Amino acid sequence: MSIEANDPNSEETPRRIWLRMVPLAVALLIGGFLFVGLNLRPKEIPSVLIGKDVPTFDLPALPGRPKGLKSADLKGQVSLVNVFASWCVSCRAEHPLFMKLKAQNIVPVHGLNYKDEGPAAIGWLQRYGDPYDRVGADLNGRVGIDWGVYGVPETFLISAEGRIVCKHIGPVMERDLQEKLLPAITALQKGGTAKC
Amino acid sequence: MIAELGHYALVLALSVAIVQATVPLYGAWRGDPGWIGLARPSAIVQCLLVVIAFAALMHAYITSDFSVLNVATNSHSAKPLLYKISGVWGNHEGSLLLWLLILVLFGAAVAVFGGNLPAPFRARVLSVQAMIGVGFLCFVLFTSNPFERLLPAPIDGRGLNPLLQDPGLAFHPPFLYLGYVGFSMAFSFAVAALIEGRVDAAWARWVRPWTLAAWCFLTTGIALGSWWAYYELGWGGWWFWDPVENASFMPWLAGTALLHSSIVVEKRDSLKNWTVLLAILTFSLSLLGTFLVRSGVLTSVHAFATDPARGIFILAFLIAVIAGSLTLYAFRAPAMKGGGLFAPISREGGLVLNNLLLSTACATVLLGTLYPLFLDAVTGEKITVGPPYFNATFGPLMVPVFLAMAVGPMLHWKRGDVLGAVQRLKFAVAASVIALFATLVFAFDGPWLAIPGIALGVWMIAAALEEAAYRIRLFRVPVADSLRRLWRSPRAAWGTTFAHAGAGMVIIGIVASSAWQVEKLQIMQPGESVSVGSYEFKFEGAAPIPGPNYEAVRGIFQVSRDGKDIAVMQPESRKYQDPPMDTTEAAIRTGWGGDLYAVIGDPTGDGSWSTRFYNKPMIHWIWIGCLTMVFGGLVSLSDRRHRVGAPVRGKAGAKTATKMSAGAKPPTPVVTK
């Protein structure tokens, strides 16, 4: 019995043409999935905390800045909690958006200063502006663990009942704000429910 | 100013590449020697221009010119010079420029040294190579310009990720890219052959050295990367089946298959169709690897900057290259008529088996790597595919590869005899049976799979050696005669011996280090001791040590065995400032039996420290084995037939022949085997 790698005498049958199209078809299929994949967010792992009450915590204020942050502060009105640090470069990217939110007085934004040093954080807020209502200093990151923080920046949307409605990982960009956060905030403020 | 020159050089390189991608190709079709002749000078000019651009970026890094955005984001004035240089490719824009540099260097190498290629064929190869160049130049210029200015310039840069500040990793990307891009040569040759409609032994003889060189580089790159993961990440692991690792491993598997199938084309004028397809797929997988790493489509421990616009661009390019070449393949493949017939049991048959198994293994890795993406796209469910999948699928597929690779070189071409081949390997059979029982006695309680695993490794090494002994007729002819044969037998055959023995060493290293590793994790006070296997670690204390751009804490451990002090190990835990990040520097003591591995972690606050210790028997065999494989590749690369030049191509069809004669050089002498 012999194998012929390529039968030199065979007529080109349609079946063989289709066979040779297989690599192309597989490549295009994978390409299609990769295209879809570009618009997916693999890092957006659904948080188990969604829909739950915020973890119980009580953080001191930054040195020289009034108002620390504790769980009770998050009850009573819809708010955002932004995890930030002076050493975090992407935090600088989202910072102007929070400044704008403050200027328009749409929703209070609280800061969770994550694994930072007090003076450095104060200096950072003085340099780029302070958009926060309350800021809790989480020096060793213990509270961050309870919140399931695994990268800075992260932003949580908290309902008036003190429940975590939604979690955004990475810097908040204009589009995230317009398409995701603001509609949810408006719905919550009107007393409705929201999901994102 | 220098940065602008670099930018301008890239723009010029793009225009040259566009000319090179079109004019010589059209010239080769028309048979116009003038247009064909344009390929060589343009490849050289394109290379010079990209070298200028790369030198400009290198200059900006060395002089810490923070008015260049890329330098400000990724470098820091306090960084040692080596890492200022490696910082050039330690980021997205710079690494693409490195990709491009290697691509044009290889193109120029074909232009300069490819004198024995028929001019129209060389023109086609260089045109295809330039098309890839156009794609990457556009990518760099339109989405990832490394020369973008930042005004006003900051006082200092943000620094390179400290994990990447390491000699192993400084050279890991260039080697990986030399491998990836090296496969672009095989790709260009394959596409040029498809356009010309002809693949023959001469073609395989040109493709083989390029594939072999690329394979050596890629093997080195992967080995360096895993070695870095082993000593830098601090968990004692060396391979994680991470998507980015898989991205480099898939081209390696396909490239290894290509390496073997091109032998059949060269020696037996068969498997042409398949070899051309493999050449296309190998480079496609290299591109896919670049895409996966650069686009952030998959989550990975290798978090690079990700940007959807770049992702779209590179995906479009990827699809254009792959779909284009595969379409060409679908229509032109029938033109590659195969010649040699062979029986299923033969050297060719063995190589076909190797190819089938390696490509299946490669497909398995591809499926596992992309599966989270498929599932997320279809159902929105998020999963990760981890080591259990790969160990369960990849492992069993490779076992027959390893079993067969010992027998393959003993089989005859055309028609072989497995029983006879195994009989000729009687010493190897004996050695592996002895190894089986020795392991059984030594590790009676050990994991059962480790026992055949070690025997398999011994089988591969012993068979490689016995095949070499058989080749030089050791002890069957006078020793002097054998020595003469040793010197005169083809280097390619010696390459096989080293590469196959090296693979056996890797297997032994993997099996032994994972089966008999001892691991201890604990909190220790200074003065305390812990025993790890037969070793005793005494914690003497920890002290802060300042570094050039970091603060370190160094732990001191006195290691003893049977009451005798044998070493002092000093692992460090480093805190970098720019950017702020902690890294562990494991202390590793390599002995004949294996590695001792110590890591110091964080202080607990009450004077004690978290520590980790491992004893990993024979783990260095993994890297020594990889080096042996690379050495085998280099030996094979030095084979006389690659230096003497390719044989003249067989008589082509009348039409091509007349066209070729216009620009073709006088034929080089035929090499006899």
Image (spheres, coloured by chain):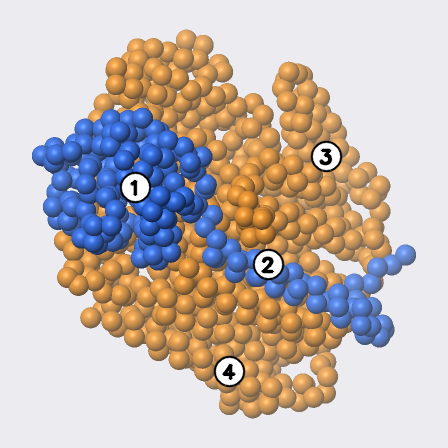
Chain colours: A blue, B orange
Residue under the point 73% across and 84% down: B653
Tag on residue B428? 3
What percent of the width, then of the height, locates residue B391?
62, 37
Residue, disc 2: A30
Picture quarter containing residue B394? top right
Residue B300 vertical position relative to residue B70 in the rendered view, above or below: above
Q: Nearer the viewer, residue B133 or B642?
A: B133
Would you say B484 lies left or right of A31 here?
right
Chain for disc number 3: B
Label 4 to label 1: alpha-carbon separation: 62 Å
Residue under the point 53% across and 34% down: B621
Is residue B247 shown to the viewer in this render?
Answer: yes
What percent of the width, then of the height, locates residue B435?
68, 26
Q: Do the residues labelled 3 and 1 touch (CB within 8 Å)?
A: no
Residue, disc 1: A78
Q: What residue type is labelled 2?
A: Ile
State which mark lies toward you, 2 or 1. Answer: 1
Would you say A69 lies left or right of B332 here?
left
Q: Is mark 3 on a helix, strand or loop?
A: helix
Label 3 to label 2: alpha-carbon separation: 44 Å
Residue, disc 4: B22
Label 3 to label 4: alpha-carbon separation: 55 Å
